[in-house]
Amino acid sequence: MILGRRTALAAGASAIAMAPAIVRAQAPLKLPLSTVWPDANFHTVNCVRFAVEVKKATDGAVDIEVKSGGQLGFKGPEHLRAVRDGLVPLADILTVQQVGDEPVMGIEGIPFLCGTPDELKILFKYIRPAYDKIATKNNQTILYMVPWPNQYLHLKVKAENVDALKGIKIRVADKNSQEMWTTVGMSAVLIPWGETIPALASGAVSGVSTSAVSGVDGKFWEFLKFFHATNHQWSSQIVTINNDTWKKIKPEHQKAILELTKKLEPEFWVSAFQADTDSSRKMIDSGMTRVTVPDTMTADLRKRTAALLADFIKRVPAAEAPIKGYLAEMKRA
């Protein structure tokens, strides 16, 4: 599949080179943006809005086409490498799925590091510079960064204490989540989003650790009964552009795009938490029950997973400075 894309890109480049100069000057730069999320997902909706606004801001010179649902053939964990290698010019990348290549991107997924969106904004202040350096190292530029909202534990059974979770096989998206749920006695399996619904349908897993937004995307009510408001970790999507592609865009259009992202990113944050409210309502309307996790269970989860923060810093020394900066500002150092 990759060879096919490369051949197609080469053929396209050859055709452009042979075109008359006046045609080349007037033709817009057409750029696919790859995402694994479906059309109705708020991140995809944001990508589409971004694409529309970029076209306006550049007077049609930059034309981004959002390719949703993984239609370009890339799985979520492959997106950072795909943009790096020029296999796709732009992608919507789930940070915590890139830890195999860039372990620092797992910071957001440390259990209970942040408790609220406001705390997450403070964390972003410390990790965004580190993420920008990672992007540069991987031949790309971050255009904007938007979090997933509150996280839930979606299960067939209602759990009101940690012991009730023991032995349940659950799908997780990243290593931090896998370590967290394994620590409390669950059987956590790393599965990309595109393989999650088949795993639920086949009975390979009987629960999912993710947002209510993904719960709606996957129609979890067809397989599960309860979603528990654990809000145990965070993750975000970063939309990046390959730097070789970025250099093809005129400086004035680069400036317009960056100004646009500064305007849109706060609005996209609002859409994230509105999506949580809307998705939770949809899950309930579709027959699922939202479980408010007892304080005693939350305290037990925090206690059993507390050591994972130190373990993460030990495993990823580059994460120590941004984490300690955040904790100091939160007066938790």
Image: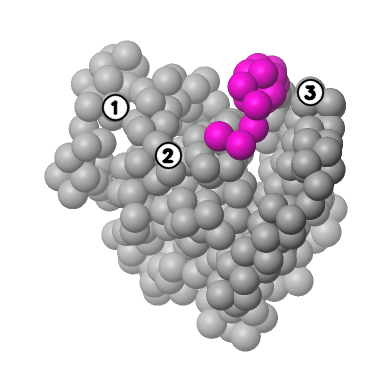
Question: In front: mark 2 or mark 1?
Answer: 2
Query: Is 254 part of what is drawn in magenta?
Result: yes
* As drawn, 125 above or below 291: above
Q: Looking at the image, tell me whether mark 2 or mark 1 is earlier in sequence order.
A: 2
Query: Quadrant of residue 199 in the image?
Result: bottom right
- Element under disc 2: helix
The Cα–Cα distance between marks 3 and 2, rounded to whole angstroms, is: 24 Å
Q: What colouring method underlies this structural image?
A: one colour
Give the left or right position of residue 253, taking residue 321 as reference: right
Query: Quadrant of residue 330 in the image?
Result: top left
Residue with the mark numbered 3: 57
| The residue stretch that appears in magenta | 247-263
Give the left or right position of residue 223, taking residue 115 as reference: right
Instruction: Identify residue type, mark 2.
Output: Ala
Instruction: Identify residue type, mark 1.
Output: Pro
Which label sits on residue 199? none
Instruction: Identify residue type, mark 3.
Output: Ala
Q: Residue at x 64, y 32 (%)?
A: 249
- Element under disc 1: helix
* As drawn, 180 above or below 71: above
Question: In front: mark 3 or mark 2?
Answer: 3
Residue with the mark numbered 2: 135
Quadrant showing the C terminus: top left
Query: Is 197 part of what is drawn in magenta?
Result: no
Between residues 172 and 1, which one lies in front from this camera angle?
Answer: 1
Q: Residue at x 62, y 85 (%)?
A: 202
The Cα–Cα distance between marks 2 and 1, rounded to whole angstroms, is: 16 Å
Residue with the mark numbered 1: 322
Query: Quadrant of residue 325 in the image?
Result: top left
Could you classify mark 3 by the number of other residues whose Cα lies within 10 Å: few (under 14), some (14-19), or many (20 or more)?
A: some
